[in-house]
Image (tube, helix red, strand yellow):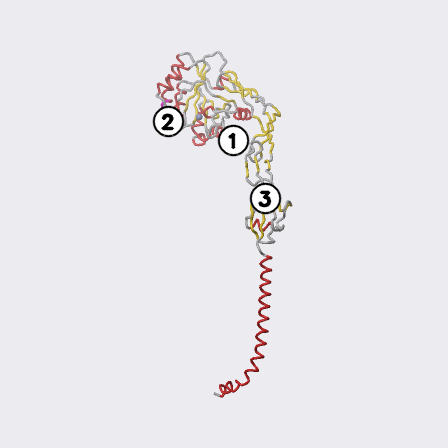
Amino acid sequence: MEKRDEITDASPTDAVSSDAKGHRVRLIAGVVAAVVFGVALVAAAVAYATRPIPVMVDGHRRMVPQHTTVAGLLAKHTIAIRNGDLIAVISRRVLRAGGGVTGTIVVDSRLATPGTQVREDSVVSSVVGTDIVEPTRSARVTIVPGSHFSGHGPYVVLSDPGQEGVRIVTRGAVSGELVTTTLIAQARPGMITRHGYTGRAKVISLTFDDGPWPGTTQQILAILAKYKIKATFFMIGTQVERNAAVARAVANAGMSIGNHTQTHQGLAKLSASKVMWQIRTDQSTIVGATGVRPLWLRPPGGEMSRIVYQQANAAHMRLMLWDIDPNDWKRPPTATIVSRVLSAARPGAVVLMHDGGGDRSNTVAALPTIITKLLKAGYHFETLDQMFGR
Ligand SMILES: [Zn+2]
């Protein structure tokens, strides 16, 4: 209540105080106006200072903030660095896009760094890096000599090992494209001489492969014993391991034993060390089981290569193929096996048959007829050692 009265009482002094108030208001308004103007000025200055500027980027007009650097242009993908390519030495095809020299950025005709700033109307361009041709690599390449064959017959002798040749071959290191090839030394082919029986006797040699085979091998031994005939058995090492007693029976019967490799793997595509392993392992397996050291080697399937000739020589073994192959392992009828052998029989022939590798009952059944007919025709039977000498 009292306060309200005071306010009412104060009204007579209003004229004086409103005059002083008017000064204050004008002062405040002036300051505010000055501040607003100042702020506007600063804002305008800032706006001017940061307004986008036009630049030419690779022939296109672009608006960018002032003080933009090359790094900034790259970051915003306004421009890109374009490297050269890695290209093939001969075909010039691109092996790796961007694998060449790093591209550069030029600002106003000057090589720019990432920190280079663009100015209004700057001309910015991306210069593609040059292509790089792939490096080349030279290698010494062995020329494997071929083989010359001469003569006829089942006994195969490497009469001259020949000589490897050498060439230097240069290729693209990435593409492999051939650049040059330089002959350093010509290869000299090996000489393979095939021998047949040269004696005058009417002899023939029976050979049995892929054993020892339980049952079949003993049946064949019994037939041979009945006619007092000696033959040659080319044994597989793994078969000897499984059937050592059968292998011993062959040796005890006075038969000749040959090496038919340890596992009966085709030798033509094997490395030298693998061929040698096949030969040596079978040798020691046979020697271990029978005490007989084979002289003859018959590669499975007759598969041979330059390596096989060389490794047989190194192992001091003689390579023996055959003259007559009735294909008995395909189990043709007994009469077919008989007629195939008899129709091809001639003095000095080596006959290939099988005591192992599966059911050979047709071979066993054919054998007595083959033997009696040949004996009747005047042949006598020899082992390979007897026919070709040991
Ligand atoms: Zn075989």
Q: Whole-percent x and y of residue 122?
A: 61, 48
Left or right? Give the position of 320 relative to 134: left
> What residue appears at the point 52 percent right and 17 percent down from the top-left corner?
150
Rounded to the nearest whole Å, what is the CA distance between mark 1 and mark 2? 30 Å
**What amino acid is labelled 1 in the image?**
Lys
Which residue has dot 3 on it?
126
**What amino acid is labelled 3 in the image?**
Ser
Q: Which mark is residue 190?
A: none
Q: State ligand 1's quadrant.
A: top left
Q: Nearer the viewer, residue 292 or 94?
A: 94
Q: Please provide the residue range marked out in magenta.
A: 358-362
Image vertical order of residue 85 relative to residue 207, above or below: below
Earlier along the polypeptide chain: callout 1 or callout 2? 1
The quarter of the displayed image where residue 134 is located? top right
Rounded to the nearest whole Å, what is the CA distance between mark 2 and mark 3? 80 Å
Local crowd size for mark 3, using a 10 Å CA cut-off: few (<14), some (14–19), many (≥20):
some
Left or right? Give the position of 213 relative to 55: left
Mark 1 or 2, which is nearer the eye?
A: 1
Which residue has dot 2 on it?
359
The quarter of the displayed image where residue 315 is located? top right
Which residue has dot 1 on it?
274
Q: Nearer the viewer, residue 143 or 257?
A: 143
> What residue appears at the point 38 percent right and 14 percent down from the top-left corner?
373
State whether label 2 is within 8 Å of ligand 1.
no
Q: Secondary structure at mark 1?
A: helix
- Whether residue 310 is in magenta: the answer is no
The secondary structure that most of the magenta stretch takes on is loop
Local crowd size for mark 1, using a 10 Å CA cut-off: few (<14), some (14–19), many (≥20):
some
Q: Whole-percent x and y of residue 281?
A: 50, 30
State whether label 3 is within 8 Å of ligand 1.
no
Q: Whole-percent x and y of residue 26?
A: 58, 74
